[in-house]
Amino acid sequence: QVQLVESGGGLVQAGGSLRLSCAPSGRTSSMYSMGWFRQAPGKEREFVSAITWSVTWSGVNTFYSESVKGRFTISRENGQNTVYLQMNNLKPEDTAVYYCAAARGRRDLEYATQYTYWGQGTQVTVSS
């Protein structure tokens, strides 16, 4: 089992920044692709970003939804499953609970069904 704990959420004004962190615990000897999803009130959970793992740093790939591309940056500690989401130029429509997730594979990471482990989520609220 792998437990994921998100942190870094909060309240910020539009145009501001937040950095989310996701720290895994438990059976972390295996490497996972890591993803971020979000769910706003009354809406379905949606893909935000993902990062694969690789035995070489140059082999890591990142993916973003169109709505956050150019504003959000995902990164991970080299050789570890700890992952970050730097969110800049936040907009009120970014308001949601953000979830970290871990997947064994490295494909189709925009689909929630690819992920085995999920965190409890952290609230991000952007005021206008």
Image (cartoon, rainbow, N blue to C red):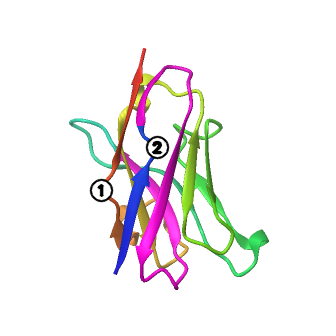
Whichever of callouts 2 and 1 sits on the residue coming sooner in the sequence is: 2
In 3D space, how far apart are the residues under numbered discs 2 and 1 (Cα atoms)?
13 Å
Residue 105 percent across, percent down from the top left: 50, 78
Residue farthest along the top direction in this orientation: 128
Q: Would residue 31 appear left or right of 101 to someone viewing this image?
A: right
Q: How many marks?
A: 2
> Considering only vertical position in the picture, is 48 above or below 23?
above
The residue under label 2 is 8
**Of all residues shown, which one is farthest toward the right?**
58
Amino acid found under the numbered disc labelled 1 = Gln
Query: Residue 1: where, in percent of width, then height?
Result: 34, 81
Residue 123 image position (x, y, % from top left) = 34, 39
What segment is highlighted magenta in the picture?
10-38
Q: Main secondary structure of the magenta part?
A: strand
Q: Secondary structure at mark 2?
A: loop
Using residue 25 as the reference point, say whether residue 71 is left or right of it. right
Whether 25 is among the magenta residues is: yes
Q: Is residue 84 visible?
A: yes
Label disc, if present, on residue 6 of the rendered structure: none
Q: Check disc 1 and report its element: helix, strand or loop.
A: loop
The reply to whether the magenta stretch includes residue 46 is no
The answer to whether residue 113 is seen in the rendering is: no
User: Which residue occupies 43% across, 32% down?
Assistant: 94
Quarter of the image with the C terminus in it? top left
**Residue named by callout 1:** 120
Q: Position of residue 81 (x, y in %)?
A: 55, 70
